[in-house]
């Protein structure tokens, strides 16, 4: 297991390097020039100096290596020294956002809690809904509950979040006035009232994403449980006289949750991507919204960093999914 | 004497019988045909120009003259829904075809040519590790202006969106097709064809391709759904088609500004996207069930 983990981590390194190269080249070779937006009154030699100050004068492989060094050495060191209070980084250059002129990683760290709260909570809620619904639908196949659940899950992943979100705003904010339609990030939870407000403003984005996630996971859960229900060991358990509750909850659930755990782990990074839209709908200023505004402002360092962070998440959770599968299902051996 | 029915037609009938018994798939199929008619021949019957600005009737609700009302400039919503749907569905189908082409080609090559299997599957894994939606946004931002200048504002963006959706959604098809090719390749009829000296390209075309058609058809259905949602999402984020060029996602995006006053304007394009995607997904579900021989007769 340990050997497998180490080997997979070593494979992840070239994958990530390759992805970073693709991202770097994509942004670098794209037509367009960061100085093109500057006023025409700036003389061309000054423009050239601006280009040099942005680091655009060097040949492409030097710039790529410099970027790698900044991203993998300098930024973690700065982050560490902020966390520990020690001066580890010295005055190593940082990745600076063109838009706000402050270090990219600082802004990302600032935005991260909002995204984690909204996205993470919605994922947890989604899983908590999906697993029981999937199991019950499979046990009562073709019952009204199953029909309803299957239909709801079909609707759930067919209706895009930018429509279901807007629909919820129309119903709950405009007509009923229960929830605020805009997420207030400056809000601090200090007492019960402010906690209630926080819950109310998180309700809608979490509901939208949770429904979307639950729709996908419950389909897998149902299929996986159905596959297991007709197997011999289930018949044996019933023949031994086990109550149906034990058969389902102990025997079947334990065996059918394996593939679903993989699906859940693989879904986490795509959720970060999907949350871009939900954050935009509810004006949550998380990572997704940061990506959108940096794209609109052509803030290349920020876009590069964020896209790469998303890529790291995907590779990381792929690895995690494989490892989890081995833990949940002991029959799987990675030797 | 019992006459054996020709194999092909009987398989086709089996598939159709199974497909027919799937109510959702049948309904979805019907609705998708309706959407296709709505966006292609609809404008021939509903002759109001979707670009015609009539400020005096702006923001009107449902009426006989404007069954779905008008927008903030007095443009007829029904006509705009038709013309916008034409773009959305066209993008969906074109992107699906492109992704099928790439995915099918890579899947067949990887399954059939052993030497290419490793590299092509690593490439597929790599594409699966890319953060797709952020990347789509970045690519569109970077290449929008150049393509606009070369092909004109609408055609340029159309090509760009179809290309980026196609290039980023072929991986599942490639994997499924490869798996299917690997099993079909070892079957007797392929070995027999090989033994009489059939050239490789003809084996692929005559023997392998027809047998891997069913997973390709299923991913075609799901591909349309995915492409329509992605295009609408891009338009919704303001990075799709130009603002005066209607698509369903764009209509929805524009309507959110007037959410409080005229919530019904959000409803129509949103419903159009959701119902189309739902019907296509049901079609895919039904196709998967009916093309899988193990499911037949259940």
Image (cartoon, coloured by chain):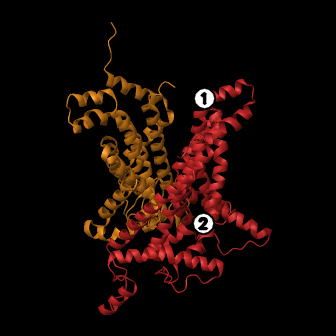
Chain colours: A red, B orange
Q: Is residue B213 above or below residue A81?
A: above
Would residue B276 appear left or right of B39 to someone viewing this image? right
- Disc count in the image? 2
Residue furthest to the top in view is B1
Residue B253, can we see it?
A: yes
Task: Provide the chain ID for the residue under circle 2.
Answer: A
Would residue A169 appear left or right of B174 to someone viewing this image? right
Judge the density around disc 1: few (<14), some (14-19), many (≥20) Cα neighbours within 10 Å: few
Q: Position of residue A155 (x, y in %)?
A: 55, 46
Res. A49 mark: none
Secondary structure of the residue carrying tag 1 is loop
Q: Position of residue B285 (x, y in %)?
A: 48, 38
Name which residue lies at 69% across and 73% down.
Answer: A187
Q: Quadrant of residue A69?
A: bottom left
Q: Which is more N-terminal, label 1 or label 2? A: 2
**Contact? badges 2 and 1 (CB < 8 Å):** no
Name which residue lies at 59% across and 73% down.
Answer: A109
Would residue A83 appear left or right of A271 to someone viewing this image? right
Camera-side residue: B164 or A178? B164
Name which residue lies at 61% across and 80% down.
Answer: A81
Q: Is residue A7 above or below residue A44?
A: above
Task: Provide the chain ID for the residue under circle 1.
Answer: A
Name which residue lies at 34% across and 29% down.
Answer: B187
Residue furthest to the right in view is A192
Secondary structure of the residue carrying tag 2 is helix
For marks 2 and 1, give the CA distance. Answer: 42 Å
Q: Which residue is mark 1?
A: A231
Same-chain status of marks 2 and 1:
yes
Residue B49, can we see it?
A: no
Q: Which residue is mark 2?
A: A115
Q: Position of residue B100 (x, y in %)?
A: 35, 47
Q: Position of residue B40 (x, y in %)?
A: 34, 48
């Amino acid at each position: 297991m340990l050997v497998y983990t180490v080997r997979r981590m070593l494979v992840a390194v070239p994958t990530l390097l390759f992805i970073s190269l693709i991202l770097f080249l994509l942004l670098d070779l794209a037509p367009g020039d960061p100085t093109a937006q500057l006023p025409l009154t700036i003389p061309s030699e000054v423009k050239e100096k601006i280009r040099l100050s942005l680091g655009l004068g060097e040949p492409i492989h030097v710039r790529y290596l410099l970027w790698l060094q900044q991203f993998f050495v300098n930024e973690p060191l700065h982050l560490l020294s902020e966390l520990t209070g020690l001066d580890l980084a010295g005055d190593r250059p940082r990745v600076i956002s063109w838009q706000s002129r402050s270090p990219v990683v600082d802004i990302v760290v600032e935005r991260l809690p909002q995204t984690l709260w909204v996205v993470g909570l919605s994922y947890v809620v989604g899983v908590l809904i999906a697993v029981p619904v999937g199991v019950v639908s499979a046990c009562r196949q073709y019952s009204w509950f199953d029909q309803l659940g299957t239909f709801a899950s079909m609707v759930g992943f067919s209706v895009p979040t930018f429509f279901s979100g807007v629909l919820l705003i129309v119903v709950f904010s405009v007509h009923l006035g229960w929830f605020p339609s805009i997420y207030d990030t400056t809000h601090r939870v200090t007492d019960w009232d402010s906690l209630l407000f926080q819950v109310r403003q998180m309700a809608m984005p979490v509901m939208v994403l949770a429904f979307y996630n639950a729709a996908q996971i419950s389909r897998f859960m149902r299929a996986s449980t159905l596959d297991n229900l007709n197997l011999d060991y289930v018949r044996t358990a019933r023949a031994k006289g086990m109550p149906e509750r034990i058969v389902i909850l102990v025997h079947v659930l334990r065996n059918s949750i394996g593939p679903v755990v993989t699906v859940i782990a693989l879904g986490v990074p795509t959720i970060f991507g999907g949350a871009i839209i939900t954050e935009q709908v509810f004006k949550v200023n998380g990572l997704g919204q940061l990506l959108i505004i940096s794209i609109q402002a052509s803030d290349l360092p920020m876009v590069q960093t964020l896209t790469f962070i998303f890529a790291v998440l995907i590779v990381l959770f792929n690895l995690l999914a494989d490892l989890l599968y081995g833990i949940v299902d002991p029959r799987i051996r990675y030797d | 004497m019992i006459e054996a029915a020709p194999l092909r037609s009987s398989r086709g009938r089996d598939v159709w019988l199974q497909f027919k018994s799937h109510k959702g798939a049948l309904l979805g199929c019907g609705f998708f045909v309706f959407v296709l008619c709505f966006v292609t021949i609809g404008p021939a019957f509903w002759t109001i120009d979707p670009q015609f600005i009539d400020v005096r009737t702006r923001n009107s609700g449902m009426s006989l003259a404007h069954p779905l009302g008008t927008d903030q400039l007095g443009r007829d919503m029904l006509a705009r829904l038709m013309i916008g749907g034409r773009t959305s569905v066209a993008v969906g189908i074109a992107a699906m075809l492109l992704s099928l082409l790439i995915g099918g080609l890579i899947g067949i090559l990887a399954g059939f040519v052993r030497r290419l299997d490793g590299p092509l599957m690593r490439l597929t894994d790599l594409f699966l590790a890319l953060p797709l939606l952020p990347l789509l946004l970045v690519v569109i931002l970077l290449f929008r202006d150049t393509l606009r200048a070369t092909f004109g504002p609408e055609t340029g963006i159309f090509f760009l969106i179809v290309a980026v959706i196609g290039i980023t959604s072929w991986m599942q098809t490639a994997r499924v097709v490869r798996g299917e090719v690997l099993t079909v390749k070892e079957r007797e009829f392929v070995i027999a064809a090989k033994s009489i000296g059939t050239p490789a390209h003809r084996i692929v075309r005559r023997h392998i391709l027809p047998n891997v058609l069913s997973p390709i058809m299923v991913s075609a259905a799901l591909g349309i759904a995915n492409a329509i949602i992605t295009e609408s999402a891009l338009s919704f984020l303001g990075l799709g088609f130009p603002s005066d060029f209607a698509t369903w996602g764009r209509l929805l995006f524009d309507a959110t500004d007037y959410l409080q006053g005229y919530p019904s304007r959000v409803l129509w394009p949103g419903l159009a996207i959701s119902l189309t995607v739902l019907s296509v997904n049901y079609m895919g579900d039904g196709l998967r069930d009916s093309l899988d021989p193990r499911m037949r007769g259940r």
